[in-house]
Amino acid sequence: MTAIAKARALALIVPVALLGGAYVSQYWGHLYPCEMCWWQRYAHMAAIALALLAYAAARSALARPLLLLAALAILVSGGIGVFHAGVEYHWWEGLTTCSAGATGGSAKDVLADILATPMIRCDQAQWTLFGLSLAGYNAIFSVLGGVAVTWLALKR
């Protein structure tokens, strides 16, 4: 198997496996996604689409650029995973209201903020294994997978 064929396979397998794991944890494990979880999923969805296009264009000059874009999408999901894990471990604040409390103002404004806040908070890990949350695992596997796809796609 050539390096480019390995890159194509990995560019499809990594996001499919990670997205599949996310959906299994949601529907069988009852771990519902927060807003930042969805951001990570969107990047994997884009990576899958790009990897499928790379398969369709396997014999054309577009194959390598499509693989590099798929690798970039996988790396983006990993970067979001790093940021999300940092929010969960309270290393920094999140960008969204899913990790912020009520802001103040009148009682009516506070109540409106509470009612508008999503039920699943981005700053609280719902599940951990060996001290790592799902966002942390996504970060590790996405960054490693994205780097591997990039390396294989650029290998001559």
Image: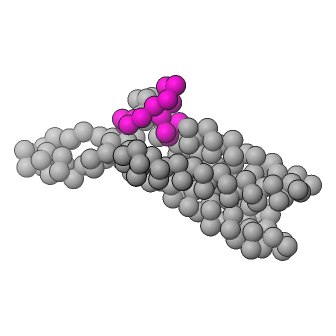
Residue 60 placement: quadrant: bottom right
- For the question of whether residue 155 can be seen, the reply is yes
Q: Is residue 47 above or below residue 111?
A: below
Residue 17 included in the magenta stretch of the image: no
Residue 131 included in the magenta stretch of the image: yes
Q: Is residue 58 above or below residue 149?
A: below
Quick one: 90 or 5, which is closer to the camera? 5
Q: Residue furthest top?
A: 130
Location of the N terminus by quadrant is bottom right
Q: In the drawing, does residue 115 fall left or right of residue 145? A: left
- For the question of whether residue 36 can be seen, the reply is no
Q: Position of residue 107 (x, y in %)?
A: 7, 44
Q: Position of residue 73 (x, y in %)?
A: 62, 56
Location of the C terminus by quadrant is bottom right
The image shows a total of numbered marks equal to 0
Residue at screen point 62% across, 45% down? 142
Q: In the drawing, does residue 150 fall left or right of residue 124? A: right
Q: Is residue 101 above or below residue 149?
A: above
Quick one: 60 or 101, which is closer to the camera? 60
Q: Residue furthest front?
A: 28
Residue at screen point 33% across, 42% down? 121
Q: In the drawing, does residue 107 fall left or right of residue 119? A: left
Q: Position of residue 127 (x, y in %)?
A: 42, 35
Segment tinted magenta in the rendering: 123-136
